[in-house]
Image (tube, rainbow, N blue to C red):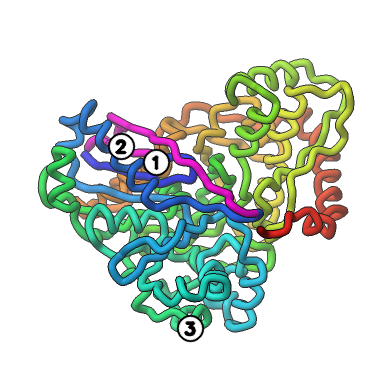
């Protein structure tokens, strides 16, 4: 048995996979995000740990036999978050998350200090990345910055609590702007640019390597055997790719979670920072990947469901299905899904969500459909940036909570112009991938033996008629962002 723990933005998920690569148990515990000021997005690391313990306590109660057989643990998690610890490993402040936009000016300062940033890191300095957050902390919370002894990514804080180790791995470290992505090592120049010593960084491993063992007291609490190995793991997208077997060059993954990601595996470092494409290490030795990221995907559906008083997302999707079946010739509203700013291709933390073209004829279902379409358009922007950067996109697998909707799948396939392969266990992808990494760390098995793709449940092909309907709307979508871009910053509330 092998355990995968995925620390997401909205929940902690834990899954147990058996030796036949089947998910035999799972648990999910929700998390909340705090937004104390405009552009801010934070979480308390202690809440991550409480949720992890609650998930594993539940598995111990319901699936004690399976948990007792676990030999390896893998970790995955939301990337880029800055978890700041003092010399006694005490948390200094709430973690600053991946979708936090406060450090725009810090990004410009970091690029001034490190003129080789793009070449070293393969990425633009974006507010979501970790290093600009530390520049911001140094500028605005200097006394706290002076006490920083370690900076850990979210999943690596869980590792510290689970095993006592300060460790990370290549895929998650790629999203800090401290990693020399081509050389797979911390960059002295980038650390110097943020006024940090290398001692503030965790030691680096590959995602399939062991980093330590589960603490004895925790093994006893959860009825597990001593000596359970903990793997390096992966950032959520890289671990999700492991879960669906996206490990060879050209294999691709579309992840519809809180954010939306197009992930393309490769065997070389291939940066394209000019269009805000991420060039990261994969969580396997000798592999890299390119990635386009939109900051709001399934979270837009949750938002519009709550905004319009729908019972839940599933109920709203049923209403959208009815509208879609009607295929009315009347044009619905167009939605810009920039509820948390945007990354690829705009790198714009000030971008805002917009409904354009509302009338008395539009109700909840039309707003919901516009949201599904707007997210698809944002992903199409990301796909264009990947292709411009030389990505060779082959078969696309789909995972994430947003993968449940057939209507959304039809819109996505038609807008992206490619078939989408929906896989079994699509909603537990990163946690399942983490379990596979835990297996490789514990057993030494090969990538080929551990990373086969799960069964394809369905394939959604592009719909030519729908694609034709969406084409002029996508052009309007792009025009709207261009027209409004200069106005978005004026809508930012003043900091308290």
Q: Residue at x 41, y 65 (%)?
A: 84
Q: Position of residue 253 (x, y in %)?
A: 52, 45
Q: For the residues marked 2 and 1, what is the alpha-carbon distance in whole angstroms?
A: 9 Å
Give whichever of discs 3 and 2 has the lower sequence position: 2
The residue where tag 3 is placed is 192
Q: Residues within 10 Å of mark 1 (few under 14, many from 20)?
A: many
Q: Quadrant of the N terminus?
A: top left
> Which label sits on residue 12?
1
Tell me the SS state at disc 2: helix
Residue 25 sits in quarter: top left
Q: Give the mark toward the camera: 2 or 1.
A: 2
The residue where tag 2 is placed is 54
Left or right side of 129 for 229: left
Q: Quadrant of the C terminus?
A: bottom right
Which of the pair 489/142 is nearer the observer? Answer: 142
> Which label sits on residue 247?
none
Q: For the residues marked 3 and 1, what is the alpha-carbon distance in whole angstroms?
A: 34 Å
Q: Position of residue 417 (x, y in %)?
A: 69, 40
Q: Give the mark toward the camera: 3 or 2.
A: 2
């Amino acid at each position: 048995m092998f355990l995968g723990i995925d620390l997401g933005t909205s929940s902690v998920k834990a899954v147990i996979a058996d030796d036949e690569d089947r998910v035999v148990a799972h648990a999910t515990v929700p998390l909340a995000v705090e937004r104390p000021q405009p552009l801010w997005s934070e979480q308390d690391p202690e809440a991550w740990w409480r949720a992890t313990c609650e998930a594993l306590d539940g598995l111990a109660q319901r699936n004690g036999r399976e948990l007792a057989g676990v030999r390896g643990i893998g970790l995955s998690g939301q990337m880029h978050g800055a978890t700041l610890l003092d010399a006694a490993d005490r948390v200094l402040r709430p973690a600053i998350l991946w979708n936090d936009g406060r450090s725009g000016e810090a990004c410009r300062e970091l690029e001034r200090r490190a003129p080789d940033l793009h070449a070293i890191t393969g990425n633009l300095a974006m507010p979501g990345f970790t290093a600009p957050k530390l520049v911001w902390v140094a500028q605005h919370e200097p006394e706290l910055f002076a006490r920083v002894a370690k900076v850990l990514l979210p999943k690596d804080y869980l590792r510290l609590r689970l095993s006592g180790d300060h460790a990370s791995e290549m895929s998650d470290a790629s999203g800090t702007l401290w990693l020399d992505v081509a050389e797979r090592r911390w960059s002295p120049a980038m650390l110097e640019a943020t006024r940090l010593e290398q001692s503030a960084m965790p030691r680096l491993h590959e995602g399939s390597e062991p980093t330590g063992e589960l603490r004895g007291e925790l093994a006893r609490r959860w009825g597990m055997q001593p000596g359970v190995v903990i793997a390096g793991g992966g950032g959520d997208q890289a671990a999700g790719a492991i879960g669906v077997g996206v490990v060879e060059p050209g294999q691709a993954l579309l992840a519809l979670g809180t954010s939306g990601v197009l992930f393309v595996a490769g065997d070389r470092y291939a940066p394209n920072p000019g269009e805000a494409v991420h060039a990261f290490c994969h969580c396997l030795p000798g592999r890299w990947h390119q990635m386009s990221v939109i900051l709001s995907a399934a979270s837009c559906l949750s938002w519009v469901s709550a905004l319009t008083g729908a019972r839940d997302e599933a109920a709203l999707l049923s209403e959208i299905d009815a509208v879609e079946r009607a295929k009315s010739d009347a044009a619905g509203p167009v939605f810009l899904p920039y509820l948390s700013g945007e990354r690829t291709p705009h790198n714009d933390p000030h971008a805002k969500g917009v409904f354009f073209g509302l009338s008395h004829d539009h109700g909840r279902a039309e707003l919901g459909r516009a949201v599904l379409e707007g997210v698809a358009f944002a992903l199409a922007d990301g796909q264009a940036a990947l292709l411009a950067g030389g990505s060779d996109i082959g078969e696309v697998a789909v995972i994430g909570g947003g993968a449940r909707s057939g209507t959304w799948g039809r819109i996505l396939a038609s807008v992206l112009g490619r078939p989408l392969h929906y896989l079994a266990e699509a909603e537990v992808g990163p946690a399942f991938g983490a379990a596979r990494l835990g297996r490789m760390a514990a057993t030494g098995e090969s990538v080929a033996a551990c990373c086969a793709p799960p069964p394809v449940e369905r394939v959604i092909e592009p719909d030519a008629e729908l694609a034709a309907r969406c084409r002029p709307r996508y052009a309007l979508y792009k025009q709207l962002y261009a027209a409004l871009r200069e106005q978005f910053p004026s809508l930012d509330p003043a900091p308290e």
